[in-house]
Structure formats: C-alpha cells, structure tokens
Image: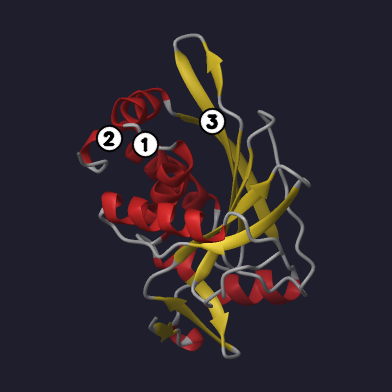
Amino acid sequence: MEFHWIDIESWKRKAYFEHYLGQSKCTFSMTANLNVTVLLSQLRQKHVKLYPAFLYMISRVINSHEEFRTDFHGGKLGYWEQMNPCYTIFHRDDQTFSAIWTEFNEYFPLFYEHYLQDQQQYQAQKGLFVKEMPANTFSVSSIPWVSFTGFNLNIYNEGEYLLPIITGGKYYQDGDHILLPVSLQMHHAVCDGYHAAVFMSELQELADTCGDWLGQ
C-alpha cells in the first residue's frame, strides 16, 4: 500500500508536530457515547453482526482523513493511502485473544464477506499475532463486558506512536436510545481536539445513515 511522504518544512502542522513530539510529548484520549439505536435495528433486520459494522464505520472515518493515517514508516513521516483495521478475537476457553486484520473495502457487503472469511480461518488459532500484519493497519479493541465512561491506553515507545487507537465497550439502554461507549486515543503531534470531534461526529453520522451503506 502506497505511503505518501510529508515534507515537514512546508507542512502546516510543523510547529505543532515538533512541539508535541519533542518538547512536550503528548497523547490524549476522548470517550463518547455512540447512539446505535438505528444501527442495531438495521443490523438485526439484515442478520448482520455488530462488530464488523463497527469496524467498517471506524475504517470509513479513518480513511477519510490524512490526519488519522499519519505515521512513521521507514524512519520517515507520511500518511498511508489506505489503512486496514487490526482487531482481536477472544478465546473463551482460556480468556486470551489473538490479533488479526481484515482488508478494508468501502463496499460494506464485500468487507463483511472478508471479515467472515478471516473469522473462519483464524478464530481457532492461538497466539498474539496469527495473521501476518502489514504496516498500514490501525488498532481497534473491544471490551464488550463493561459500559465504561472513560478509557485510557498508555503506550511506552518514546511517545512516537502516531496512529489513532479505538476501543468500544458494552452497549446499554438509556431511555429510548441504545448507547455504545467509544474511546479514541490520538497523538497531539498530528491531531487536535477538533479532529477527535470530527471522528466522533462522522462515526455517529455513519451509524445514523447505516441504511445507505449496509446493502441488501
């Protein structure tokens, strides 16, 4: 997958990047409730699983913005042309998990088909990484046993992990709505609060308009 180099000297974020990567290394996280009332209704009617739909929506948003695809590759800064979601399979028998990935496709039925194929092939395999991981992946995790109000993930790699990390929780009923907590972790060198708000807003829009992309 193509990686586009960024010329830092002419980059609009040069000052912010150098400050938050060098002088004041800084990541931040935000947790918001995603209203999945419409989404769940549509998924049940079409007999489609929630988790791959969640992965798809996140991937759509990630692939819509360069800021969310900005990364170091080969020691240089740039952004990926397209990214694929890396996510986990939970093994109930021993409470461990394995990380796999599914190639993103904007046509949801095709992405869903690829997801089901990956599940069938890798769900019984044990180990941390059971499918060779390409560089152009971003991380999504799920804690479906608890409806958290906040979640923070700490990565110790000299503060140079730039890609967003998304964590979903257990959805719950709140009046007439069904809400799913979503935590987003970002690096301040490449994203600000504005970008976090864009992410959450576009994720909600996809949940509300799921009838447009779910297909038959």
Label 3 Cα neighbours within 10 Å, binned few <14 / some 14-19 / many ≥20? many
**Picture quadrant where residue 106 is located:** bottom left
* Mark before the other along the chain sequence, 2 or 3: 3
Q: Residues within 10 Å of mark 1 (few under 14, many from 20)?
A: some
Q: CA distance from mark 2 to mark 3?
A: 16 Å
The label shown at residue 180 is 3
Q: Residue furthest top?
A: 175
Q: Secondary structure at mark 1?
A: loop
State how far apart marks 3 and 1 are (Cα): 17 Å
| Residue 187 visible from this viewpoint | no
SS at badge 3:
strand
Relative height, residue 146 to residue 194 (above, below): above
Q: Which amino acid type corresponds to the residue marked 1 in the rendered image?
A: Val
Q: Earlier in the sequence, mark 3 or mark 1?
A: 1
Sequence-first disc among 2 and 1: 1
* Residue 95 placement (x, y as % from top left): 76, 45
Q: Residues within 10 Å of mark 2 (few under 14, many from 20)?
A: few
Q: Which residue is mark 1?
A: 48
Q: Residue at x 24, y 43 (%)?
A: 213
Q: Which mark is residue 209?
A: 2
